[in-house]
Image (cartoon, rainbow, N blue to C red):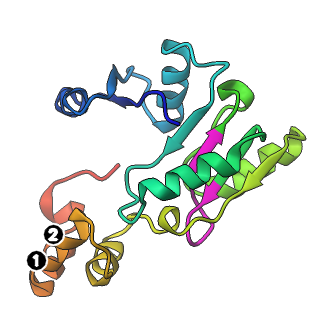
Amino acid sequence: MIGSITIVSADRNVLRFGQRLGANSLRETPRRGLNNAIGQVIRKCKLENSTVLVIHADLPLLTGKEVNTLLREARGCPIAIVPSEDETGTNAMVLNPARVIRPAFGKGSYKRHISIFQREKLQFKVQRIQGFAFDIDEPKDLLELMRHKGRNNTARFLRAMRERDLQKVLSYTPASTGLRMT
């Protein structure tokens, strides 16, 4: 059972939106990044001895049933980790207690996490759950999602766009738009 949801962001609009949905909000510190944000939540919410579930927001096929499966399977183990489909990234992790390790999310995080667990001789479970596997990391992932038969809002929106229009949107590069990708 999930006791609370906390959203960490530097964007006040995101925090307000989360609050309207019933989530706790925490303004991200100037020292940004996912790993720092997770640490910030654990410290500020005094969750050091609690179980913490980290789920990325770019998992459009994830269902509530699959989240419950992960939580059920993680019981009794300090760490449960769910890799991305290509096993380069970590798409979810259950930490019990939250302070058992310092997360190391980012490029190549799945193998990095496994190395940390093994080096620290920590017990862990690897969970491969379908809805956690597919993530949106690159423009081609949006095209794949558009073709997916899933019935979620993101897939429906993408299917409503004509593929040609989506290709046009995806062909923009940061250099051509003046946007900076981080």
In which quarter of the view is residue 172 placed?
Answer: bottom left
Q: CA distance from mark 1 to mark 2?
A: 5 Å
Q: Nearer the viewer, residue 14 or 156?
A: 156
Q: Residue at 55%, 13% (x, y): give it.
A: 46
SS at mark 2 in the image: helix
Which residue corresponds to the image point at 63% horizontal and 37% vertical from the top-left? Answer: 103
Q: Residues within 10 Å of mark 2 (few under 14, many from 20)?
A: few
Q: Which residues are magenta?
A: 82-94
In-image side of 120 versus 11 (left or right): right
Q: Is residue 34 above or below residue 112?
A: above
Residue 67: x percent and y percent?
A: 51, 51
- Residue 93, labelled with which disc? none
Q: Which residue is at 48% across, 28% downward?
A: 3
Q: Position of residue 20 (x, y in %)?
A: 19, 29
Horizontal placement of 39 versus 95: left or right? left
Q: Is 119 situated left or right of 18 in this image?
A: right
Front residue (pair 72, 98): 72
Give, as a three-letter code, the residue at label 1. Ala
Vertical relation: 53 (above or below) 149: above
65 on left or right of 85 = left
List the residue tagged with mark 2: 157
Q: Are marks 1 and 2 in contact (CB under 8 Å)?
A: yes
Residue type at the position of mark 2:
Phe
Residue 160, numbered circle: 1
**Residue 174 in sight in this render:** yes
Image coordinates for residue 42, horizontal then vertical, percent: 55, 21
Which residue corresponds to the image point at 23% horizontal and 65% vertical from the top-left?
154
What element does badge 1 sit on? helix
Quadrant of the rendered image containing residue 159: bottom left
Q: Is residue 141 above or below residue 73?
A: below
Q: Position of residue 32 (x, y in %)?
A: 42, 30
The reply to whether the magenta stretch includes residue 36 is no
